Amino acid sequence: MENSPPPRMPERFRGFLPVVVDVETGGFDCTRHALLEIAAIPIELDDDGYYVPGEVATSHVEPYEGSEIDPKSLEITGIRLDCLLRGALPEREALDHVFAKVRAAVKRNGCQRAILVGHNAHFDLGFLNAAVSRVGHKRNPFHPFSTFDTVTLAGMAYGQTVLSRAVQAAGLAWDGDQAHSAVYDTQRTAELFCAVLNTWRRFSVKESGS
């Protein structure tokens, strides 16, 4: 039995709710390359105080007018812009869809704001902030510059910084055929983030003599 109750999310990260985000894009420059996919998964707590991935919110995104797309990026992601089944939304609608679910998770967990968790988080946050700026979105739930980066966490915990290797080092499954999909990469990153935090929690519980 634990001597103290499990932490509540608002108390764990100064009122921030960690939300794992992955974007797929038409290149590396957020100021000129298109945002093509976005996925977000809130991190929540189970009844025992351990971290678990919540439900995914995702959208395919129409390239904004005047954006550039590097064909090499499409080769990596496998995105077919001419596929009608993509169901892509304009940037504003895509952000509305994802942000609404993130705000609901923030409220549900008693937090004040979301903080982006990403593998090379500055990349995902850069594209997210660029899209927010383009459409003039006023209800962005994410902190504008603070992040949690699983590259750093995985390097510390497992000695690996590449996502696929870090996930496998954590004892989790990795399917290379599904990689570079925003949903798949977000799911694996969320599991990796939870694995690191839960290992630390188990260590803390053991050290406390619980």
Image (cartoon, rainbow, N blue to C red):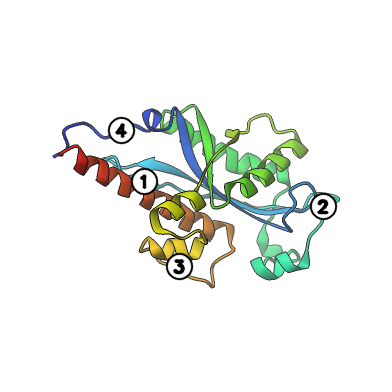
Where residue 136 appears, as percent x and y from the top left, is 75, 33
Q: Is residue 156 left or right of residue 25?
A: left
Amino acid type, label 4: Pro
Q: Which mark is residue 197?
A: 1
How far is the residue under mark 2 from the one under mark 3? 32 Å
45 up-or-down from 38: above or below? above
Q: Which mark is residue 174?
A: 3
Where residue 161 appears, as percent x and y from the top left, is 50, 58
Label 1 or label 2, whichever comes before in sequence order: 2
The structure residue drawn at horizontal position 54% and vertical position 52%, both measured from the top left corner, is: 119
Q: Which mark is residue 7?
A: 4
Secondary structure under tag 4 reads: loop
Q: Which mark is residue 67?
A: 2
**Residue found at the far right of this picture:** 66
**Can you tell which of label 4 and label 2 is closer to the viewer?**
4
Where residue 78 appears, as percent x and y from the top left, is 66, 69
Decide which of 107, 67 is in the foreground and name it: 67
The structure residue drawn at horizontal position 59% and vertical position 43%, both measured from the top left corner, is: 98
Amino acid type, label 3: Trp
**Can you tell which of label 1 and label 2 is closer to the viewer?**
1
Q: Is residue 158 left or right of residue 175?
A: left
Label 1 or label 3, whichever comes before in sequence order: 3
**Can you tell which of label 1 and label 3 is closer to the viewer?**
1
